[in-house]
């Protein structure tokens, strides 16, 4: 098995976490924080928007089963990459669309994917997803891990996450774990 890790920010990490946990070839998902200045940030600090961190997920995957390009395609399907520092009602730099490459090859692939998607006209507005370096990815608190499956009655999950996941699963059902 050839293991690779993608670190992705696409708004609230609960949705991205829940989606990638169902993708075939993904071996591990962890919600966390990347790209900021504060050491060992916590959720409350990151939510202020002053630490510079984005809510992210680290997606470990078997690159013999799913490629980084496939992971990027799913990432772009899960959120609106054309809205700066915002996903729906979640507003602030902590909700930015960002890719934190773990290798030079991933950085190149991410830049190529963004250029390809911009040229495709898939969205009316240009993609604002950033490609950023992060020396450290800080794990989010335990209660954020697998949040949607542990909190299915949560209002935010019901109103925001579940509809987004239903759309994603309908569009990408062929990529899900049976």
Image (spheres, rainbow, N blue to C red):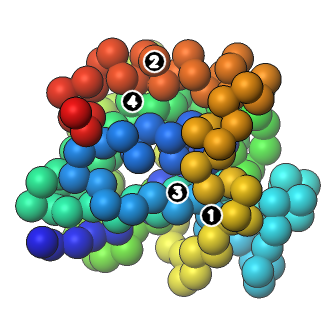
**Residue that label 4 marks:** 77
Would residue 62 be seen by someone viewing this image from the given angle? yes
Would residue 98 be seen by someone viewing this image from the given angle? no
Tell me which label, 2 or 3, sits earlier in the chain. Answer: 3
Q: Does 10 sit left or right of 93 as displayed?
A: left
Identity of the residue drawn at 20% across and 63% down: 62
Tell me which label, 4 or 3, sits earlier in the chain. Answer: 3
Quarter of the image where the N terminus is located: bottom left
- Number of other residues with Cα within 10 Å of mark 1, as a class: few under 14, some 14 to 19, many 20 or more: many
Quarter of the image where the C terminus is located: top left
SS of the residue at dot 2? helix
Query: Residue 37 occupies which quadrant of the picture?
Result: bottom right
Dots 3, 1 in contact, CB < 8 A: yes
**Residue that label 3 marks:** 57
**Residue that label 2 marks:** 166
SS of the residue at dot 4? helix
Q: CA distance from mark 2 to mark 4?
A: 12 Å
**Residue that label 1 marks:** 32
Tell me which label, 2 or 1, sits earlier in the chain. Answer: 1
């Amino acid at each position: 098995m050839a293991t690779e890790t993608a670190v992705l920010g696409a708004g609230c990490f609960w949705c991205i976490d829940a989606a990638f946990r169902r993708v075939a070839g993904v071996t591990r998902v962890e919600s966390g924080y990347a790209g900021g200045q504060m050491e060992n940030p916590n959720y409350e600090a990151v939510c202020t928007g002053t630490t510079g961190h984005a809510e992210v997920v680290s997606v470990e995957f078997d690159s013999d089963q799913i490629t980084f390009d496939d992971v990027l395609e799913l990432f772009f399907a899960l959120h609106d990459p054309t809205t700066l520092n915002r996903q729906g009602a979640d507003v602030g730099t902590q909700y930015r669309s960002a890719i934190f490459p773990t290798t030079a090859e991933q950085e190149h692939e991410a830049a190529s994917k963004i250029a390809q998607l911009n040229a495709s006209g898939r969205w009316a507005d240009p993609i604002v997803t950033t490609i950023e370096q992060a020396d450290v990815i800080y794990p989010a608190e335990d209660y954020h891990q697998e949040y949607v499956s542990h909190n299915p009655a949560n209002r935010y999950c019901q109103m925001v996450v579940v509809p987004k996941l239903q759309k994603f699963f309908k569009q990408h059902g062929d990529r899900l774990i049976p």
